[in-house]
Image: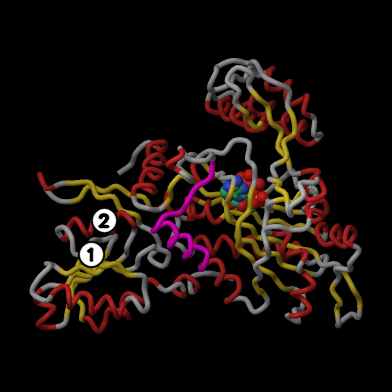
Protein backbone atom coordinates (compact mmCIF):
# COMPACT_ATOMS: atom_id res chain seq x y z
CA UNK A 1 0.00 0.00 0.00
CA UNK A 2 1.61 3.29 -0.93
CA UNK A 3 1.41 6.08 1.61
CA UNK A 4 2.90 9.50 2.30
CA UNK A 5 6.53 9.13 3.30
CA UNK A 6 6.25 11.11 6.54
CA UNK A 7 3.49 8.75 7.61
CA UNK A 8 5.64 5.77 6.78
CA UNK A 9 8.47 7.02 8.99
CA UNK A 10 6.07 7.76 11.86
CA UNK A 11 4.65 4.29 11.53
CA UNK A 12 8.08 2.69 11.52
CA UNK A 13 9.11 4.49 14.71
CA UNK A 14 5.84 3.65 16.45
CA UNK A 15 6.13 0.04 15.33
CA UNK A 16 9.70 -0.18 16.61
CA UNK A 17 8.48 0.72 20.07
CA UNK A 18 5.28 -1.28 20.08
CA UNK A 19 7.05 -4.48 19.10
CA UNK A 20 10.04 -4.28 21.43
CA UNK A 21 12.69 -3.10 18.99
CA UNK A 22 13.59 0.33 20.37
CA UNK A 23 12.62 2.29 23.48
CA UNK A 24 13.57 5.85 24.39
CA UNK A 25 16.30 5.78 27.06
CA UNK A 26 15.05 6.28 30.65
CA UNK A 27 11.53 6.64 29.34
CA UNK A 28 9.92 6.78 32.79
CA UNK A 29 11.82 10.05 33.27
CA UNK A 30 10.61 11.32 29.87
CA UNK A 31 13.67 10.08 27.99
CA UNK A 32 17.09 11.51 27.29
CA UNK A 33 17.71 13.40 24.05
CA UNK A 34 18.84 11.19 21.18
CA UNK A 35 19.66 8.22 23.39
CA UNK A 36 17.79 4.95 22.84
CA UNK A 37 17.63 1.44 24.25
CA UNK A 38 17.17 -1.71 22.21
CA UNK A 39 14.41 -4.04 23.35
CA UNK A 40 14.02 -7.80 23.21
CA UNK A 41 13.60 -7.93 19.42
CA UNK A 42 15.85 -4.98 18.68
CA UNK A 43 18.83 -6.52 20.40
CA UNK A 44 18.50 -9.69 18.32
CA UNK A 45 18.28 -7.78 15.05
CA UNK A 46 21.20 -5.58 16.07
CA UNK A 47 23.32 -8.58 17.05
CA UNK A 48 22.53 -10.23 13.74
CA UNK A 49 23.52 -7.17 11.70
CA UNK A 50 26.76 -6.95 13.69
CA UNK A 51 27.46 -10.62 13.13
CA UNK A 52 26.78 -10.31 9.40
CA UNK A 53 29.25 -7.44 9.22
CA UNK A 54 31.84 -9.07 11.48
CA UNK A 55 31.88 -12.37 9.67
CA UNK A 56 31.93 -10.74 6.26
CA UNK A 57 35.09 -8.92 7.34
CA UNK A 58 36.94 -11.27 9.67
CA UNK A 59 35.79 -14.73 8.66
CA UNK A 60 35.77 -14.20 4.91
CA UNK A 61 39.08 -12.35 4.65
CA UNK A 62 42.30 -14.08 5.61
CA UNK A 63 44.02 -10.72 5.90
CA UNK A 64 41.54 -9.02 8.22
CA UNK A 65 41.54 -9.54 11.99
CA UNK A 66 39.43 -7.97 14.71
CA UNK A 67 40.10 -6.15 17.96
CA UNK A 68 38.04 -4.67 20.77
CA UNK A 69 39.67 -1.49 22.08
CA UNK A 70 38.53 0.41 25.18
CA UNK A 71 36.20 3.38 24.86
CA UNK A 72 38.51 5.54 27.00
CA UNK A 73 41.82 6.42 25.41
CA UNK A 74 44.75 8.63 26.32
CA UNK A 75 43.72 12.28 25.78
CA UNK A 76 46.64 12.79 23.41
CA UNK A 77 45.01 10.38 20.98
CA UNK A 78 42.38 13.03 20.25
CA UNK A 79 45.00 15.72 19.87
CA UNK A 80 46.84 13.63 17.28
CA UNK A 81 43.65 12.67 15.44
CA UNK A 82 42.60 16.30 15.14
CA UNK A 83 39.41 15.86 17.15
CA UNK A 84 40.33 18.29 19.93
CA UNK A 85 41.01 21.10 17.49
CA UNK A 86 38.73 20.28 14.63
CA UNK A 87 35.81 18.00 15.56
CA UNK A 88 33.17 20.66 15.80
CA UNK A 89 30.06 21.88 14.06
CA UNK A 90 29.02 25.52 13.57
CA UNK A 91 26.06 26.24 15.83
CA UNK A 92 23.65 29.11 16.20
CA UNK A 93 20.95 29.82 18.81
CA UNK A 94 17.62 31.49 18.35
CA UNK A 95 17.29 33.98 21.21
CA UNK A 96 13.49 33.71 21.40
CA UNK A 97 12.97 29.95 21.32
CA UNK A 98 16.37 29.26 22.98
CA UNK A 99 16.74 26.44 20.45
CA UNK A 100 20.12 25.51 19.05
CA UNK A 101 20.74 24.64 15.40
CA UNK A 102 23.59 23.63 13.18
CA UNK A 103 24.20 26.65 10.99
CA UNK A 104 25.12 24.52 7.98
CA UNK A 105 21.92 22.48 8.32
CA UNK A 106 19.75 25.59 8.43
CA UNK A 107 21.38 26.68 5.19
CA UNK A 108 21.01 23.25 3.63
CA UNK A 109 17.31 23.21 4.46
CA UNK A 110 16.98 26.61 2.84
CA UNK A 111 18.68 25.26 -0.29
CA UNK A 112 16.21 22.36 -0.36
CA UNK A 113 13.33 24.81 -0.03
CA UNK A 114 14.62 26.83 -2.99
CA UNK A 115 14.98 23.64 -5.02
CA UNK A 116 11.45 22.50 -4.21
CA UNK A 117 10.13 25.90 -5.35
CA UNK A 118 12.10 25.62 -8.60
CA UNK A 119 14.45 28.50 -7.65
CA UNK A 120 17.48 26.63 -8.90
CA UNK A 121 19.71 29.70 -9.32
CA UNK A 122 19.13 30.82 -5.76
CA UNK A 123 19.78 27.30 -4.50
CA UNK A 124 23.05 27.08 -6.41
CA UNK A 125 24.22 30.51 -5.26
CA UNK A 126 23.55 29.69 -1.65
CA UNK A 127 25.22 26.29 -1.99
CA UNK A 128 28.34 27.95 -3.41
CA UNK A 129 28.45 30.61 -0.73
CA UNK A 130 27.94 28.06 2.02
CA UNK A 131 30.71 25.80 0.69
CA UNK A 132 33.02 28.78 0.58
CA UNK A 133 32.19 29.77 4.17
CA UNK A 134 32.69 26.18 5.38
CA UNK A 135 35.96 25.89 3.50
CA UNK A 136 37.28 29.13 4.96
CA UNK A 137 35.87 28.28 8.37
CA UNK A 138 34.25 31.71 8.19
CA UNK A 139 31.60 31.74 10.93
CA UNK A 140 30.65 35.37 10.32
CA UNK A 141 29.91 34.57 6.67
CA UNK A 142 27.62 31.72 7.72
CA UNK A 143 25.78 34.05 10.06
CA UNK A 144 25.42 36.63 7.31
CA UNK A 145 23.98 34.02 4.93
CA UNK A 146 21.35 33.03 7.50
CA UNK A 147 20.35 36.69 7.88
CA UNK A 148 20.52 37.48 4.17
CA UNK A 149 18.29 34.52 3.24
CA UNK A 150 15.82 35.47 5.97
CA UNK A 151 15.93 32.06 7.62
CA UNK A 152 13.55 31.85 10.56
CA UNK A 153 13.58 29.57 13.59
CA UNK A 154 10.97 26.83 12.99
CA UNK A 155 9.87 27.08 16.63
CA UNK A 156 9.64 30.83 17.33
CA UNK A 157 9.31 31.94 13.72
CA UNK A 158 11.73 34.82 14.41
CA UNK A 159 15.09 35.85 12.98
CA UNK A 160 16.59 36.80 16.33
CA UNK A 161 19.87 34.85 15.99
CA UNK A 162 23.08 34.76 18.02
CA UNK A 163 26.50 34.67 16.37
CA UNK A 164 27.66 31.38 14.87
CA UNK A 165 30.12 29.55 17.15
CA UNK A 166 32.06 26.31 16.89
CA UNK A 167 30.83 23.53 19.15
CA UNK A 168 33.09 20.55 19.87
CA UNK A 169 31.16 17.30 19.61
CA UNK A 170 33.26 15.25 22.03
CA UNK A 171 31.95 14.37 25.48
CA UNK A 172 34.56 14.71 28.19
CA UNK A 173 34.66 13.30 31.68
CA UNK A 174 37.11 12.94 34.56
CA UNK A 175 39.28 9.97 35.31
CA UNK A 176 40.52 9.17 38.83
CA UNK A 177 39.60 10.92 42.06
CA UNK A 178 41.05 14.39 41.46
CA UNK A 179 38.94 16.61 39.29
CA UNK A 180 41.89 18.31 37.67
CA UNK A 181 41.99 19.61 34.09
CA UNK A 182 44.78 17.21 33.26
CA UNK A 183 42.56 14.27 34.14
CA UNK A 184 40.02 15.02 31.40
CA UNK A 185 39.34 12.04 29.19
CA UNK A 186 36.95 11.80 26.28
CA UNK A 187 34.34 9.29 25.28
CA UNK A 188 35.59 8.21 21.86
CA UNK A 189 33.77 9.91 18.97
CA UNK A 190 34.85 7.15 16.56
CA UNK A 191 36.23 3.65 17.00
CA UNK A 192 38.98 4.08 14.39
CA UNK A 193 41.60 5.52 16.73
CA UNK A 194 41.65 2.35 18.84
CA UNK A 195 42.76 0.59 15.68
CA UNK A 196 45.45 3.10 14.74
CA UNK A 197 47.12 3.02 18.14
CA UNK A 198 47.12 -0.80 18.07
CA UNK A 199 48.36 -1.03 14.51
CA UNK A 200 51.84 -2.30 15.39
CA UNK A 201 50.65 -4.54 18.24
CA UNK A 202 48.38 -6.40 15.84
CA UNK A 203 50.79 -6.37 12.92
CA UNK A 204 53.63 -7.84 14.98
CA UNK A 205 51.72 -10.33 17.13
CA UNK A 206 49.58 -11.45 14.19
CA UNK A 207 52.54 -11.44 11.76
CA UNK A 208 50.33 -9.51 9.35
CA UNK A 209 51.64 -8.58 5.93
CA UNK A 210 50.52 -5.49 4.09
CA UNK A 211 47.85 -5.18 2.74
CA UNK A 212 45.86 -6.17 5.82
CA UNK A 213 42.89 -4.89 7.79
CA UNK A 214 41.78 -4.50 11.39
CA UNK A 215 38.06 -4.55 12.15
CA UNK A 216 36.19 -3.37 15.20
CA UNK A 217 32.65 -2.73 16.35
CA UNK A 218 31.76 -0.62 19.34
CA UNK A 219 30.15 2.41 20.90
CA UNK A 220 30.99 5.95 19.85
CA UNK A 221 29.70 9.19 21.37
CA UNK A 222 29.00 12.55 19.80
CA UNK A 223 27.31 15.50 21.41
CA UNK A 224 25.27 16.20 18.28
CA UNK A 225 23.81 19.72 18.31
CA UNK A 226 20.53 18.62 16.92
CA UNK A 227 19.69 15.02 17.05
CA UNK A 228 16.55 13.97 15.26
CA UNK A 229 14.98 11.43 12.98
CA UNK A 230 14.92 8.78 15.66
CA UNK A 231 18.05 6.60 15.62
CA UNK A 232 19.45 8.33 12.53
CA UNK A 233 21.49 10.77 14.61
CA UNK A 234 22.16 9.69 18.16
CA UNK A 235 24.48 10.91 20.90
CA UNK A 236 25.50 7.35 21.79
CA UNK A 237 25.69 4.96 18.84
CA UNK A 238 27.62 2.03 17.52
CA UNK A 239 30.06 1.90 14.65
CA UNK A 240 31.45 -0.99 12.65
CA UNK A 241 34.76 0.06 11.18
CA UNK A 242 37.57 -1.57 9.27
CA UNK A 243 40.90 0.10 8.64
CA UNK A 244 42.80 -1.42 5.76
CA UNK A 245 46.56 -0.75 5.74
CA UNK A 246 48.13 -0.53 2.30
CA UNK A 247 51.30 0.46 0.55
CA UNK A 248 51.35 4.20 -0.29
CA UNK A 249 50.44 4.64 -3.92
CA UNK A 250 48.05 1.68 -3.98
CA UNK A 251 45.33 3.37 -1.92
CA UNK A 252 43.14 4.38 -4.86
CA UNK A 253 42.88 0.78 -6.08
CA UNK A 254 41.87 -0.32 -2.60
CA UNK A 255 39.47 2.58 -2.27
CA UNK A 256 37.73 1.44 -5.47
CA UNK A 257 37.77 -2.14 -4.23
CA UNK A 258 36.14 -1.39 -0.87
CA UNK A 259 33.60 0.94 -2.43
CA UNK A 260 32.35 -1.91 -4.58
CA UNK A 261 32.68 -4.60 -1.96
CA UNK A 262 30.77 -2.66 0.68
CA UNK A 263 27.86 -1.90 -1.65
CA UNK A 264 27.66 -5.57 -2.48
CA UNK A 265 27.38 -6.34 1.27
CA UNK A 266 24.32 -4.09 1.37
CA UNK A 267 22.76 -5.46 -1.79
CA UNK A 268 23.14 -9.09 -0.71
CA UNK A 269 20.42 -8.28 1.85
CA UNK A 270 17.91 -7.94 -0.96
CA UNK A 271 17.51 -4.18 -0.54
CA UNK A 272 16.67 -2.63 -3.93
CA UNK A 273 19.72 -1.32 -5.80
CA UNK A 274 17.86 1.86 -6.79
CA UNK A 275 17.50 2.76 -3.11
CA UNK A 276 21.29 3.12 -2.89
CA UNK A 277 23.67 5.63 -4.37
CA UNK A 278 27.26 6.75 -3.89
CA UNK A 279 27.95 10.30 -2.92
CA UNK A 280 31.56 11.11 -3.79
CA UNK A 281 32.92 13.95 -1.70
CA UNK A 282 34.18 17.01 -3.49
CA UNK A 283 35.20 18.75 -0.30
CA UNK A 284 37.53 16.35 1.46
CA UNK A 285 38.30 16.18 5.17
CA UNK A 286 41.82 17.36 6.00
CA UNK A 287 43.07 13.76 6.34
CA UNK A 288 41.52 12.27 3.21
CA UNK A 289 42.53 12.04 -0.45
CA UNK A 290 39.28 10.37 -1.51
CA UNK A 291 35.95 9.78 0.18
CA UNK A 292 32.52 8.52 -0.69
CA UNK A 293 29.32 7.89 1.21
CA UNK A 294 27.00 5.01 0.57
CA UNK A 295 23.59 6.64 0.83
CA UNK A 296 20.20 4.99 1.22
CA UNK A 297 16.79 6.37 0.35
CA UNK A 298 15.12 6.70 3.75
CA UNK A 299 11.49 7.90 3.88
CA UNK A 300 12.86 11.43 4.44
CA UNK A 301 15.37 11.29 1.57
CA UNK A 302 18.82 9.96 0.70
CA UNK A 303 21.13 9.87 3.73
CA UNK A 304 24.57 8.46 4.50
CA UNK A 305 24.74 5.01 6.08
CA UNK A 306 28.38 4.27 5.47
CA UNK A 307 31.54 6.19 4.68
CA UNK A 308 34.53 4.91 2.72
CA UNK A 309 37.57 7.09 3.19
CA UNK A 310 41.10 7.03 1.94
CA UNK A 311 42.78 8.53 5.03
CA UNK A 312 46.39 8.59 3.74
CA UNK A 313 48.97 8.19 6.54
CA UNK A 314 47.48 11.10 8.45
CA UNK A 315 46.57 9.22 11.63
CA UNK A 316 49.59 6.95 11.95
CA UNK A 317 51.97 9.81 11.16
CA UNK A 318 50.43 12.10 13.76
CA UNK A 319 50.40 9.37 16.41
CA UNK A 320 54.03 8.64 15.61
CA UNK A 321 54.91 12.32 16.05
CA UNK A 322 52.98 12.92 19.23
CA UNK A 323 53.86 9.66 20.97
CA UNK A 324 57.45 9.56 19.81
CA UNK A 325 56.96 5.83 18.99
CA UNK A 326 57.65 4.54 15.49
CA UNK A 327 54.49 3.31 13.77
CA UNK A 328 56.07 1.90 10.65
CA UNK A 329 55.84 -1.28 8.71
CA UNK A 330 58.97 -3.14 7.76
CA UNK A 331 58.64 -4.48 4.26
CA UNK A 332 60.76 -7.63 3.99
CA UNK A 333 60.55 -7.57 0.19
CA UNK A 334 62.19 -4.19 -0.22
CA UNK A 335 64.02 -4.18 3.11
CA UNK A 336 62.59 -0.76 3.95
CA UNK A 337 60.25 0.90 6.45
CA UNK A 338 57.21 2.99 5.64
CA UNK A 339 54.08 4.37 7.26
CA UNK A 340 51.15 2.60 5.59
CA UNK A 341 48.24 4.41 4.01
CA UNK A 342 44.75 3.58 5.24
CA UNK A 343 41.45 2.98 3.47
CA UNK A 344 38.60 2.71 5.94
CA UNK A 345 35.02 1.54 5.77
CA UNK A 346 32.83 2.96 8.51
CA UNK A 347 29.17 2.10 8.96
CA UNK A 348 26.74 3.04 11.72
CA UNK A 349 25.08 -0.04 13.16
CA UNK A 350 22.05 1.91 14.35
CA UNK A 351 21.62 3.57 10.95
CA UNK A 352 21.82 0.19 9.28
CA UNK A 353 19.15 -1.00 11.70
CA UNK A 354 16.92 1.93 10.73
CA UNK A 355 17.55 1.26 7.05
CA UNK A 356 16.40 -2.33 7.46
CA UNK A 357 13.29 -1.36 9.41
CA UNK A 358 12.27 1.28 6.86
CA UNK A 359 12.89 -1.10 3.99
CA UNK A 360 11.03 -3.97 5.65
CA UNK A 361 7.87 -2.27 6.90
CA UNK A 362 4.80 -3.20 4.82
CA UNK A 363 1.08 -2.81 5.23
CA UNK A 364 -0.98 -5.16 3.09
CA UNK A 365 -4.67 -5.83 2.67
CA UNK A 366 -5.37 -9.51 3.13
CA UNK A 367 -8.52 -11.65 3.20
CA UNK A 368 -11.73 -11.37 1.25
CA UNK A 369 -14.99 -9.44 1.67
CA UNK A 370 -15.77 -8.46 5.27
CA UNK A 371 -12.85 -10.62 6.40
CA UNK A 372 -10.48 -8.10 4.81
CA UNK A 373 -7.90 -6.68 7.19
CA UNK A 374 -4.56 -4.93 7.20
CA UNK A 375 -1.56 -7.08 7.82
CA UNK A 376 1.61 -5.35 9.04
CA UNK A 377 4.67 -7.30 8.12
CA UNK A 378 8.36 -6.69 8.55
CA UNK A 379 9.92 -8.28 5.49
CA UNK A 380 13.38 -8.42 7.06
CA UNK A 381 16.05 -10.58 5.44
CA UNK A 382 15.36 -13.98 7.09
CA UNK A 383 19.04 -14.26 8.03
CA UNK A 384 18.78 -11.14 10.21
CA UNK A 385 15.27 -11.58 11.63
CA UNK A 386 15.17 -11.47 15.44
CA UNK A 387 13.24 -14.74 15.66
CA UNK A 388 13.71 -17.33 12.94
CA UNK A 389 10.94 -19.78 13.78
CA UNK A 390 7.76 -19.61 15.85
CA UNK A 391 6.27 -22.92 16.96
CA UNK A 392 2.55 -23.16 17.73
CA UNK A 393 0.41 -26.05 18.90
CA UNK A 394 -3.00 -25.68 17.23
CA UNK A 395 -4.73 -26.15 20.58
CA UNK A 396 -3.59 -26.37 24.16
CA UNK A 397 -4.67 -29.99 24.57
CA UNK A 398 -4.50 -33.52 23.13
CA UNK A 399 -0.73 -33.71 23.46
CA UNK A 400 -0.17 -30.95 20.86
CA UNK A 401 1.82 -28.65 23.22
CA UNK A 402 4.09 -31.57 24.11
CA UNK A 403 4.72 -32.36 20.46
CA UNK A 404 5.34 -28.66 19.69
CA UNK A 405 7.78 -28.41 22.60
CA UNK A 406 9.62 -31.45 21.33
CA UNK A 407 10.10 -29.76 17.92
CA UNK A 408 11.02 -26.46 19.55
CA UNK A 409 13.63 -28.14 21.76
CA UNK A 410 15.36 -29.52 18.71
CA UNK A 411 15.17 -26.40 16.58
CA UNK A 412 16.35 -24.06 19.33
CA UNK A 413 19.77 -25.69 19.28
CA UNK A 414 20.23 -24.04 15.89
CA UNK A 415 17.85 -21.12 15.56
CA UNK A 416 16.32 -18.43 17.73
CA UNK A 417 12.81 -19.83 18.25
CA UNK A 418 9.66 -18.70 19.95
CA UNK A 419 6.91 -20.84 21.40
CA UNK A 420 3.32 -19.58 21.66
CA UNK A 421 0.04 -21.24 22.47
CA UNK A 422 -2.18 -18.27 23.35
CA UNK A 423 -4.83 -16.90 20.90
CA UNK A 424 -6.08 -18.17 17.56
CA UNK A 425 -3.47 -19.25 15.03
CA UNK A 426 -4.25 -16.27 12.77
CA UNK A 427 -3.46 -13.84 15.58
CA UNK A 428 -0.23 -15.64 16.37
CA UNK A 429 0.79 -15.42 12.71
CA UNK A 430 0.11 -11.67 12.73
CA UNK A 431 2.22 -11.11 15.84
CA UNK A 432 5.13 -12.84 14.17
CA UNK A 433 4.61 -11.05 10.86
CA UNK A 434 4.96 -7.80 12.80
CA UNK A 435 8.39 -8.73 14.16
CA UNK A 436 9.55 -10.32 10.91
CA UNK A 437 9.66 -14.02 11.83
CA UNK A 438 10.21 -15.80 8.49
CA UNK A 439 8.73 -19.18 9.48
CA UNK A 440 5.86 -20.34 11.64
CA UNK A 441 5.24 -24.00 12.40
CA UNK A 442 1.83 -25.26 13.44
CA UNK A 443 1.46 -28.62 15.12
CA UNK A 444 -2.00 -30.21 14.73
CA UNK A 445 -3.63 -33.58 15.27
CA UNK A 446 -2.28 -34.90 12.01
CA UNK A 447 1.23 -34.17 13.25
CA UNK A 448 0.73 -36.80 15.96
CA UNK A 449 -0.18 -39.36 13.31
CA UNK A 450 2.31 -38.73 10.53
CA UNK A 451 5.04 -36.48 11.95
CA UNK A 452 4.33 -33.60 9.58
CA UNK A 453 3.56 -29.96 10.42
CA UNK A 454 2.33 -26.86 8.62
CA UNK A 455 5.19 -24.60 7.65
CA UNK A 456 3.97 -21.09 6.96
CA UNK A 457 6.06 -18.56 5.04
CA UNK A 458 5.95 -14.95 6.20
CA UNK A 459 6.09 -13.08 2.89
CA UNK A 460 3.84 -15.23 0.71
CA UNK A 461 1.74 -16.48 3.67
CA UNK A 462 1.79 -19.81 1.88
CA UNK A 463 1.44 -22.92 3.96
CA UNK A 464 2.82 -26.31 3.17
CA UNK A 465 2.98 -29.66 4.83
CA UNK A 466 6.53 -30.61 5.78
CA UNK A 467 8.00 -33.63 7.55
CA UNK A 468 9.35 -32.74 10.98
CA UNK A 469 12.62 -34.40 10.04
CA UNK A 470 13.07 -31.90 7.17
CA UNK A 471 12.49 -28.72 9.16
CA UNK A 472 16.07 -28.04 10.17
CA UNK A 473 17.33 -28.28 6.66
CA UNK A 474 14.47 -26.31 5.08
CA UNK A 475 14.73 -23.46 7.57
CA UNK A 476 18.52 -23.52 7.78
CA UNK A 477 18.93 -22.98 4.05
CA UNK A 478 17.19 -19.64 4.29
CA UNK A 479 18.27 -18.24 7.62
CA UNK A 480 21.99 -19.02 7.73
CA UNK A 481 24.32 -16.09 7.15
CA UNK A 482 26.26 -18.16 4.65
CA UNK A 483 23.35 -17.75 2.21
CA UNK A 484 24.09 -14.00 2.23
CA UNK A 485 27.82 -14.45 1.82
CA UNK A 486 27.27 -16.53 -1.30
CA UNK A 487 25.67 -13.49 -2.96
CA UNK A 488 28.40 -11.04 -2.05
CA UNK A 489 31.28 -10.05 -4.26
CA UNK A 490 34.34 -9.43 -2.15
P1 LIG B 1 26.98 12.57 9.40
O1 LIG B 1 27.49 13.41 8.23
O2 LIG B 1 25.67 11.90 9.13
O3 LIG B 1 27.08 13.25 10.71
P2 LIG B 1 29.61 11.54 9.52
O4 LIG B 1 30.09 11.79 8.15
O5 LIG B 1 30.02 12.44 10.62
O6 LIG B 1 28.02 11.38 9.53
P3 LIG B 1 31.36 9.37 10.02
O7 LIG B 1 32.18 10.11 10.98
O8 LIG B 1 31.91 9.07 8.66
O9 LIG B 1 29.93 10.06 9.90
O10 LIG B 1 30.87 8.02 10.72
C1 LIG B 1 30.63 6.83 10.02
C2 LIG B 1 29.22 6.33 10.19
O11 LIG B 1 28.81 6.37 11.55
C3 LIG B 1 28.18 7.16 9.45
O12 LIG B 1 28.10 6.76 8.11
C4 LIG B 1 26.92 6.83 10.22
O13 LIG B 1 26.34 5.62 9.75
C5 LIG B 1 27.41 6.60 11.63
N1 LIG B 1 27.14 7.78 12.46
C6 LIG B 1 27.85 8.92 12.54
N2 LIG B 1 27.31 9.76 13.42
C7 LIG B 1 26.21 9.15 13.92
C8 LIG B 1 25.21 9.50 14.88
N3 LIG B 1 25.25 10.66 15.53
N4 LIG B 1 24.22 8.62 15.15
C9 LIG B 1 24.17 7.42 14.51
N5 LIG B 1 25.08 7.04 13.60
C10 LIG B 1 26.09 7.87 13.30
List x then y, in percent, for residue 385.
39, 63
Is residue 60 visible to us here?
A: yes
Mark 1 burial class by Cα count in 10 Å: few <14, some 14-19, many 20+: some
Residue at point 21%, 59% (across, down) = 428
Secondary structure category for the residue under label 2: helix
In this image, 187 relative to 80: left or right? left
Secondary structure category for the residue under label 1: loop
Dividing the image into 4 quarters, which one contains the C terminus?
bottom right
Q: Which residue is mark 1?
A: 420
List x then y, in percent, for residue 207.
76, 82
Q: Which residue is mark 2?
A: 431
In this image, 220 relative to 129: left or right? left
Is residue 279 visible to us here?
A: no
Range of magenta residues: 34-51
Q: Are marks 2 and 1 in contact (CB under 8 Å)?
A: yes
Question: Which circle marks residue 363 in the picture?
Answer: none
Question: By what rule are the colours in the image chosen?
Answer: secondary structure
Amino acid sequence: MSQPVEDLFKKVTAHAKEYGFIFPSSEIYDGLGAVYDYGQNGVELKNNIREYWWKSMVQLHENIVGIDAAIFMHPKVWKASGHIDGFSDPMIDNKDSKKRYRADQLLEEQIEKYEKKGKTDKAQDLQRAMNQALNDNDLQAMHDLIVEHEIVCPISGTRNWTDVRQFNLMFSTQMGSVADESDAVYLRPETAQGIFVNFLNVQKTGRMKIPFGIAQTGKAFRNEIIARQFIMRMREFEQMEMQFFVKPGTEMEWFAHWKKSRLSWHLALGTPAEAYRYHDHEKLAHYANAATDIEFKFPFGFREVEGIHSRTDFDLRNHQELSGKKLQYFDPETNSNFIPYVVETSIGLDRMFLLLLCNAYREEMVGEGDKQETRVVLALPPQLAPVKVAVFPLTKKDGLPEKAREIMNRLKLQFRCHYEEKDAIGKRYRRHDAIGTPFCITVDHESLQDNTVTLRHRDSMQQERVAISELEQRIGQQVRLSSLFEQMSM
